[in-house]
Image (tube, helix red, strand yellow):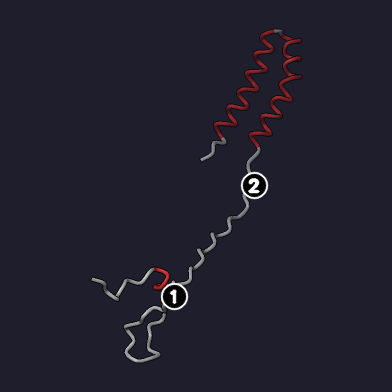
Amino acid sequence: MSTSQHEPTNDQLWLQPPVDTSATQPGQAVAPYTPPASVPAPLPAAQPYVRPDRTQFVLGIISLGVAVPLTAIGDGMNGLAGLLIVWVGIIMVNLIYGVTHRRP
């Protein structure tokens, strides 16, 4: 038994225009779906420029620069005791600065 009807192939289906069954009269077809236009995200508020705090770095450089001659002077005048006095003084200056200038 042979039938004269057969299923259309994919190529045949794609070549045919889509059938609009919702239109009751010609020209009343439903418009194709268009996705809404994307709205760009708002730009973040401009942050004012904040100059970085470099005082800790500057204090470290100055401490090293001052430590060399003061070490020589302290060692030459009082030996080990003078050396310890110089370095304890330098350490205390840096420690006090670090405690009083903590960042939140």
Which residue is situated farthest in the left direction here? 1
Amino acid type, mark 1: Leu
Q: Which numbered disc, 2 or 1, marks the residue closer to the eye?
A: 1
User: To which residue does mark 2 refer?
Assistant: 51
Residue 34: % across, % down: 44, 74
Q: Which residue occupies 60% across, 23% down?
A: 92
Residue 49 badge: none
Amino acid type, mark 2: Arg
Q: Nearer the viewer, residue 68 or 85?
A: 68
User: To which residue does mark 1 refer?
Assistant: 15
Quadrant position of residue 43: bottom right
Q: CA distance from mark 2 to mark 1?
A: 67 Å
Say which label, 2 or 1, has the lower sequence index.
1
Q: Secondary structure at mark 2?
A: loop
87 over 7 or under it: above or below:
above
Q: Quadrant of the N terminus?
A: bottom left
Q: Nearer the viewer, residue 89 or 68?
A: 68
